[in-house]
Image (cartoon, rainbow, N blue to C red):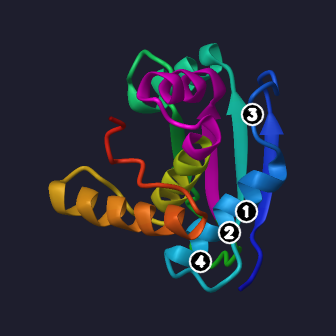
Amino acid sequence: MIEPVVHVGYAAPRRGVPAASSFRRWVAAALHGAGRRRAAELSIRIVDAPEGRALNRSYRGKDYATNVLSFPVELPPGVDLPLIGDLVICAPVVAREATEQGKNARDHWAHLSVHGVLHLLGHDHLETVQAQRMEALEIRILASLGIADPYTPIA
């Protein structure tokens, strides 16, 4: 397996946010699980709620901070680079969701990292069939990391 190049930038307080090595591991698992066999490079920016909200408003027209935003790369014709895009993950949203959903915070970070990478690779969940395929892939990738199905409700 080719190890991906993952650039991690922290634009929010680091407390409760995983180390770059964790993000690299999760990205590698997502790429491998999705069947990507060639080189890949991406950036992950960890942001606070105001930046997350501003980006979500600018790019999706939604005026609130969301957990993860995916920006697939759009290279010009003839440019062959391993870049697949950028992820923006909003730290306070991830922390709040983990608490509200009764999930282990680290597992939730892993899930959102995998989810974002799958979006960079072209997966989506706008339609039911797409959502089912993407969720099944996420569950399989997370299981390879020893993480329980994030879609199973916590009792």
Chain-order first, disc 1 or disc 3: 3
Q: Residue furthest left?
A: 128
Secondary element at image label 4: helix
Q: Position of residue 2 (x, y in %)?
A: 74, 82
Residue wearing tag 1 = 25
Tell me the CA gap for discs 1 and 2.
5 Å
Secondary element at image label 2: helix
Secondary element at image label 3: loop
Residue 76 in sight here: no
Determine which of the numbered discs, if any, sits on residue 133 in the image.
Answer: none
Looking at the rendering, the stretch of residues picked out in magenta corresponds to: 84-108
> Considering depth in this image, is 81 or 102 the residue closer to the camera?
102
- 35 w.r.t. 93: above or below: below
Q: For the residue marked with disc 1, what is the amino acid? A: Arg
Chain-order first, disc 2 or disc 3: 3
- 61 w.r.t. 75: above or below: above
> Considering depth in this image, is 65 or 95 the residue closer to the camera?
95
Residue 71 in sight here: yes
Q: Position of residue 19 (x, y in %)?
A: 82, 44
Tell me the CA gap for discs 4 and 2.
6 Å
Chain-order first, disc 4 or disc 3: 3
Q: Are marks 4 and 2 in contact (CB under 8 Å)?
A: yes
Q: For the residue marked with disc 2, what is the amino acid? A: Ala
Residue wearing tag 2 = 28
Residue wearing tag 3 = 17
